[in-house]
Image (cartoon, rainbow, N blue to C red):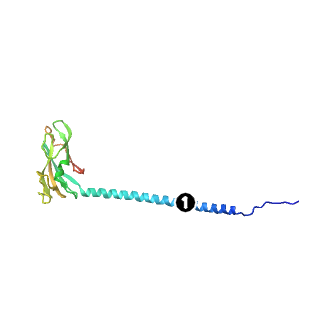
Amino acid sequence: MVFTANIPLPSKEGGKVAGFAGLAAFVLASFILLWVNLITLEESYANYSIEMESILKRIKLEAQTAKEAYALSAINKSLSTISVNVTNVGAKSLPVKSFTYCDVVVAFFDLNIGSYSSYWLPYGKPSDRGYWYVAAIYTGAVLGESINPFNLTKLTGHLDPGETMLIIAVVPQGSLVDVDSAVSVLFVSSSGVEVLEVG
């Protein structure tokens, strides 16, 4: 009796499969490493991007503040007026011609109606509904100015850095300011920079 066995001989097909499996494993490992590197880089970039955005926002805010800023001080009251000093503490001049676009809002206890009221006042033109005007200009503590002097009739000149203008807010006709109560004055420049003082 003769026994026969079928023993497979190495073939070209088997070598191709083994080579393909090795190549596939190599490509898969490369993709996994690339993916891990991309995720790491992406996280680093995201953190860097957030830090840069924060820095740029701070720089922009500081630049805006440095360009234009005001301070209010020395509020004085009478029955019909509220006066306040507006000092340019920034680095940008405020043109007189822009005053018509600046807002002055006053809030006070109105003795006529027995409660607090607030009023928006336009610049310059006397009106029964109230208005505000510039009464004096100071450079430091000295009355007057030498750089870009005001000409309120021609609307020329500037409130330059370091200069102060005394503004008088005339309240609407029929209103009476309680001089013993606190008042607030809001000044908003033509470009939207605002400052508030209570006194």
Residue 169 shows up from this direction: no
Name which residue lies at 40% across and 56% down: 50
Residue 133 in picture, x, y percent from top left: 14, 48
Q: Residue furthest front?
A: 12
Residue 99 in picture, x, y percent from top left: 17, 50
Which is nearer the eye, 178 or 138? 138
Name the image quarter holding residue 158: bottom left
Q: Residue furthest top?
A: 113
Could you classify mark 1 by the number of other residues whose Cα lies within 10 Å: few (under 14), some (14-19), or many (20 or more)?
Answer: few
**Label 1 secondary element:** helix
Which is nearer the eye, 177 or 13? 13
| The N terminus: image quadrant | bottom right
Name which residue lies at 50% across and 61% down: 37
Name which residue lies at 55% across and 60% down: 31
Q: Which residue lies under the disc numbered 1?
A: 31
Rendered view: 74 above or below 22? above
